[in-house]
Amino acid sequence: MPSTRLLALPLGATLVLTAPWPAGAANTAPVAVENATFSSPTVQTGTWATGVDGWTGPTGVASTTRSAHPQGLQAATLGWGGRAVSLSTRLRGVRAGASVTLSWDDNPDTCAASGSGPRSYTVTVAGAANTPGSFATKDPAARADWYTGRTYTFTAVEDSPQITFTNTAATNPGCGQLITNVQAAQTPPPAAAPTPATSDPCAGDGASTPACTTGAANKEKIEDCPATSRQCLEGVAGKGEKEHAGIDQQTQALDDFTHTPRDQDPNTALGPLCQVANLHTGNLEPGDTVLAPGTWWYC
């Protein structure tokens, strides 16, 4: 089932029903755009209100009557104070590396003279590979004439990338284009394939180490030796002198320990011990203990 556009519903806005996004990657998801339908500030009277909540730029918002959008939305203008202006916001839910598609609607506004030609503007975002998008409204006709569903796709080079709409009209720039219903969707970059684990010390960067290069060369030489030629094998692998010397040292140490001479015979060593025992038990009478002292000890 394809993902659908986010239903943007800022404070004071009316519910806006939007069409599904075109079929794409299964993990494409909508991104929240702050004040996407420019419902804040709400234009209660007149045709304009100064400022655009959640966006930056010296501009304002047109009332629903002035914008005359088919869905009854307010709109932001790219012309203010008699000059062309820019309007920017950040897509807070987007992460670096994601592929992002914007969608919005535009209108030349009724202030533009009928037949004066489409009103041009750009959409820009950071990133050397992200070519600015150039767009133009329909030809002014002294009435609202909305183009719905403009799109611009880019790859985010940072978290929360900033998007900017800029008026580039050469004539009467103060009569700016109207935009509204800004939506976004992102597809995260493909996950990097996991690197298979290996226990081989000569795999990858280890292949160039001296131990691995020498071992590989010796292995090829050993494979060339006849199975019955001990001399050939010893010439490649060596005779194991170090290993033999280590085994000989361990054998000698064990032999020295086993044959260590003892100073006294065990029975001879009991003599002094008996003297100590008799010293402590010599004054005891037969009735002083349950067992006679002479039965306690070897002595």
Image (cartoon, rainbow, N blue to C red):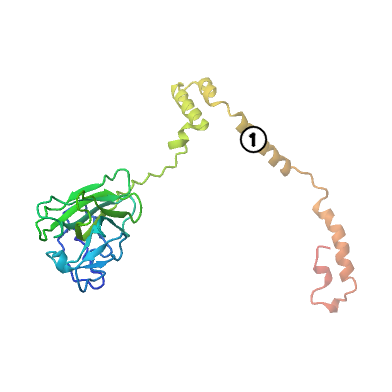
- Number of labels in the image equals 1
Residue 135 image point, x, y percent: 19, 49
Numbered disc 1: secondary structure: helix
Specify whether 123 is left or right of 18.
right
Residue 90 image point, x, y percent: 32, 58
Residue drawn at x 50%, y 32% is 209
Specify whether 161 is left or right of 238.
left
**Label 1 neighbour load within 10 Å: few <14, some 14-19, many 20+:** few
Residue drawn at x 34%, y 47% is 192
In the rendered view of the protein, which quadrant contains the C terminus? bottom right
Residue drawn at x 34%, y 56% is 160
The answer to whether residue 200 is seen in the rendering is yes
Q: Nearer the viewer, residue 222 or 121?
A: 121
In the rendered view of the protein, which quadrant contains the N terminus? bottom left
Q: Nearer the viewer, residue 145 or 244?
A: 145
Q: Nearer the viewer, residue 80 or 295?
A: 80
Q: Nearer the viewer, residue 264 or 255?
A: 255
Identify which amino acid the numbered label 1 is placed on. Gly
Give the residue number, with chain letter if any, for mark 1.
Answer: 246
Which residue ends up furthest to the bottom in the rendered image?
A: 287
Specify whether 112 is left or right of 270.
left
The answer to whether residue 203 is seen in the rendering is no
Residue drawn at x 44%, y 21% is 224
Vertical position of residue 251 compared to residue 9: above or below: above
Specify whether 221 is left or right of 28.
right
Residue 238 image point, x, y percent: 56, 26
